[in-house]
Structures are given as structure tokens and as C-alpha cells.
Amino acid sequence: MNANVGLLLEGGGMRCAYTAGVLDLFLDKGIEFPVVATASAGALIGSSYITKQRDRNHKLLKAVGKSPESISFLKMIREKELFGMDYIFDKIPRELVPIDFLAFQDSAAKFIIGTTNIDTGRPIYFDQFDTLEDLIKITRASCSLPVLASSIFHQEVELMDGGVSDPIPIKPLLEQGLKRNVVILTRNKGYIKRGTMLNWFFRRFFKEKPELIRLLRDRHHTYNQTMQTLVEMEKRNEVLFIQPEQPLKASRIEKSQKKLEELYKQGYSEAKNNIDALKRFINTAESNVDPLSMGIVSS
């Protein structure tokens, strides 16, 4: 483990099957990081890496993909929730594909989960999980997409998907003093996020939440600006991207077992192909970049 290199996991719903493959390759090669920052589905996938449960994500994604309880348009009509959040964040981690919380607690790595404060529009990062319930609850909050899932109240704060306010959470890694970071993305190189045509709907649906409306309206700008910053960091050898070589042929709510398996294998294979570059990056001498000079450390 190099104490000066962090790991960042982007979300992307079921596209994170790609990330699962990358992380299993890391486990196979004994590649560890002192701090892992996550958002949205990246948090769901990242915890298995922290516990070193090789293949758990593989099984988890199969459990989500094959079950009618996980994603249902009928559920959206009846319960105003596309995802079966109780199934995904309660039944799976406790019963079907249990997470080893003792191993999680014993890990030397710091695990950071980004969420969004609906009232202020600011990201809130959590890195203390005293119980399995804490870990499950915060992970669920970070994955609670507006409209598609209910918000979560924690410590009297209403939380939603971390990817809304900080889709690629490099800020907490920089604040930890990590000057080099490996960034796993679920979007291909050159991807540019487009604005939504649903602003009219968000204004009606969240009329009592003006900051959330603003975040959803400007989400593409936030994503693209963060990516621009990361690309500049890459040029200075401060960031190493591991991302799909081509656009992933799967959606955020993908349920096809075949496609999910292909994504997993693609992530594993592409990470394996980049293993030499990754090791060189990790072993490179520490950079002298000051995170404050980049203007992206949160207030």
C-alpha cells in the first residue's frame, strides 16, 4: 500500500459491474489504497473491496439483476420507487450476499461515502461507520436517486444520491492530503454529460427543495467541470484513469445477466491490461501539488 495514493470510485448504477471487475483484479494483485472515496453505486461496490471479499460484487450484481424485487416499473407506479431499496440495501447485504462487517472494521483503509444534503445542496461525506446499520444506511442514502428512490434521514439531515452534488468525489481525497489518485470511471474517455430536459418536472416534483432543483439543473456542468479538472491533473501525472475503452453497452438500470457479466469481465480485463501503468503510477515519487491551488476543495 502506498500511503500517498488514493482511490476514487464513480457511480453509474448497474454500470458499476465494470468497477466490480476492476476491483477484483486489484484484490487478485494485492493492490490496496489508504483512502477510498465513493459516490452513489460506487459506495455499494466499494465496501466489498474494503472487506477483501473477492467475487462478492459479482454475486451482488447477479442478485440485483435477476430479482424482480430489485428494479420494477410496476413498483415505481405503486410505491413511487423504481428500485427495491429494502431488497438491495437490507436483504442482500444481511442475508443473500452478506458483507463481512468485522473485516470492514478491521481494514486499515478509510472508506468515504459522499451524499447530498437536499436542503443546502452541499455534499456531505461520511467516513465513520460504527455499525453495519450505519454503513448500510449511508450507502443507501448515497444511492437514492431523486425521483427514483426516497430520501434518507440521518442525524436529522435529509440525504440523497451523492452523485448529484459531487459525482466524482476527488475533493475528499485531496483534503486527506493525497496528491495522486487512481480514478475508476464507468464512462468512456471523452464522455461529455448533457443537460437534462426534465427541469420542468423537477421544478414541480421538488418545488419545496430549490437547492435540489438547482443541483439537478446544473448537474452536467458539475460533472464536466470536475472531469476537466481531473484531465488536467492527469497531464501532471496526479491522476490515473481506469475507464472503459468504449461506451458501455448497458444502462444504469441494466438487468441482463449477460450484459452484466460482460461488463464485469471487461473491467477485469482492461484493469489487467493497465496493471503495469498502474504500478508505475503508484510507485512514482510524491507530487508537490497543493490541492488548495486547484480551487476544488469544498468549503
Image (cartoon, rainbow, N blue to C red):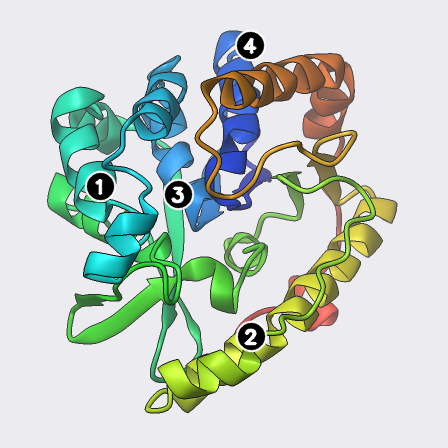
Say which amino acid is labelled 2: Leu
263, 201: nearer the viewer = 201
Say which amino acid is labelled 1: Phe
Say which amino acid is labelled 4: Lys
Residue at image position (41%, 33%) is: 45
> Mark 3 and mark 1: span between their CA atoms?
12 Å
Residue to which mark 4 is pinned: 29
Q: Is residue 131 visible?
A: no
Marks 3 and 1, the one that precedes in the sequence: 3
> Mark 4 and mark 1: span between their CA atoms?
29 Å
Q: Nearer the viewer, mark 3 or mark 2?
A: 2
> What SS does tag 2 mark?
loop
Residue at image position (81%, 51%) is: 231
Marks 2 and 1, the one that precedes in the sequence: 1
Marks 4 and 2, the one that precedes in the sequence: 4
Q: Is residue 161 above or below residue 249?
A: below
> What SS does tag 1 mark?
helix
Residue at image position (73%, 36%) is: 247
59, 279: nearer the viewer = 59
Left or right: where does residue 63 sit relative to residue 113?
Answer: left
The x, y position of residue 265, in whole percent, is 59, 14
Marks 3 and 4, the one that precedes in the sequence: 4
Left or right: where does residue 111 sit relative to residue 28?
Answer: left
Indicate which disc residue 198 carries.
2
Q: Nearer the viewer, mark 3 or mark 4?
A: 3
Residue to which mark 1 is pinned: 89
> What SS does tag 4 mark?
helix
